Amino acid sequence: MRFKSGVVVTHVGPEMERCWEVADLAFRRHTGREALVTSFREAHHSEDSKHYLRLGDPDRWPKNMLGSQGATDFRTWRGRWDARQLPMATKVAIADEMQTKLGPRWRVIVESNHIHAQDNGVVGQGLVT
């Protein structure tokens, strides 16, 4: 697995590490290439984005995100130097495999130009659906 230049990798917990491992295996299986994390704690996201969880004052984190590791994005280009998007069927297959392996605690979403994975916290303790 690789990280895009500039990705801020801080406050990484075991659930996020597991997500990255699962994504890397899914990308390798469906594309023959390793996963590329394009966003974790940096970039521009909405103010209430789960990308920013675990930064700053824990008392200000949403109570429905107890134990969440935040969110991360994965590039869905066809190749390292080919910016065309993977076929939608491939992106869906990767996301479905990730969702199955990560379980209900996670929400994996196919976006127009990336796959977004967010940890919704501990099941039974504020799981966001």
Image: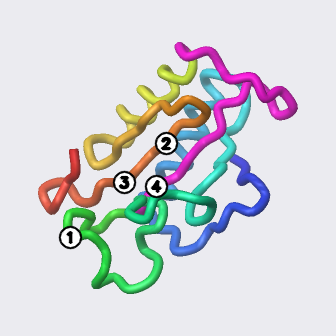
Q: Earlier in the sequence, mark 3 or mark 1?
A: 1
Q: Residues within 10 Å of mark 2 (few under 14, many from 20)?
A: some
Q: Report which residue position mark 1 lands on.
A: 63
Q: Is residue 11 magenta?
A: no
Q: Which residues are magenta?
A: 69-89
Image mark count: 4
Q: Quadrant of residue 79?
A: top right
Please tell me whether residue 36 is drawn above or below residue 126 in the rendered image: above
Side of 35 where 116 appears, left or right: left
**In this orientation, which residue lies closer to the viewer: 42 or 103?**
42
Measure how far apart labels 1 and 4 are at the Cα level: 16 Å
**In this orientation, which residue lies closer to the viewer: 73 or 98?**
73
The answer to whether the residues at label 2 and label 1 have Cβ atoms under 8 Å apart is no
Q: Report which residue position mark 4 lands on.
A: 71
Q: Secondary structure at mark 4?
A: strand
Please tell me whether residue 106 is drawn above or below residue 88 in the rendered image: below
Q: Report which residue position mark 2 lands on.
A: 116
Residue in the picture at 65% in, 38% down: 75
Residue 36 in picture, x, y percent from top left:
69, 44
Measure how far apart labels 3 and 1 are at the Cα level: 14 Å
Q: Amino acid at mark 4?
A: Ala
Q: Amino acid at mark 3?
A: Asp
Circle 3 or circle 1, nearest the eye: 1
Q: Is residue 82 magenta?
A: yes
Most distant residue in the right direction: 81
